[in-house]
Amino acid sequence: MSEIQAAAMLEEGLRTIVREEITAALRTFTAHGATQTSISGHMPAPTPLNGFDPYSLVPYVEHVLRQAGGGPLHARVIAEQVYQLGFQHRWPPKHRDQLVRTINSLAAPSQHPEMFERVAPRTLKLR
């Protein structure tokens, strides 16, 4: 067997292994309820709320909590509603739950403790 044939066989074997691993990973990922939309981002509303900067998260979260009577709401629920209202990321998030993590941190003392209060893990309400 020549070196070229051996290299071609190795390349094909490697491609097969990678393809199988990716397929298995995607099956596991989608079995846990993940969809392409939830992984890669949400489709924002055609236009953001009037007077809201589409990249500014705090006004959107405040609006969602006010609509819910001040809360409390889980950060995942807030994130879904914020996306539906037209919030957009400035760049693609590093983690698929990045918005949930960011919303959860809004009640931290270094963020906006005067506006948001954490009442349970990942659950916020307005002060």
Image (cartoon, grey):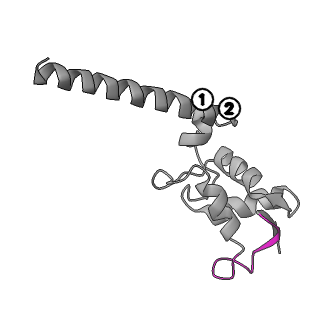
Q: Position of residue 124 (x, y in %)?
A: 79, 66
27 with respect to 65 (left or right): left
- The answer to whether 110 is drawn above or below residue 65 in the figure is below
The Cα–Cα distance between marks 2 and 1, rounded to whole angstroms, is 6 Å
User: What type is the residue that disc 1 sits on?
Assistant: Arg
User: What type is the residue that disc 2 sits on?
Assistant: Ala
The residue depicted at 67 percent of the width and 59 percent of the height is 60
The residue depicted at 64 percent of the width and 77 percent of the height is 111
Magenta span: helix, strand or loop, mainly?
Answer: loop
Quadrant, the N terminus: top left
Q: Residues within 10 Å of mark 2 (few under 14, many from 20)?
A: few
- The answer to whether 121 is drawn above or below residue 127 in the figure is above
Residue at far front of view = 1
Residue 27 magenta:
no
**Residue ID for mark 1:** 27
Q: Residues within 10 Å of mark 1 (few under 14, many from 20)?
A: few
**Residue ID for mark 2:** 31
Q: Secondary structure at mark 2?
A: helix
The residue depicted at 11 percent of the width and 19 percent of the height is 2
Q: Position of residue 8 (x, y in %)?
A: 21, 22
The residue depicted at 75 percent of the width and 75 percent of the height is 115
- Quadrant position of residue 116: bottom right
Q: Secondary structure at mark 1?
A: helix
Do the residues bearing badges 2 and 1 touch, measured as CB atoms within 8 Å? yes
Q: Position of residue 107 (x, y in %)?
A: 72, 73
56 with respect to 7 (left or right): right
Magenta residues, start to end = 108-121
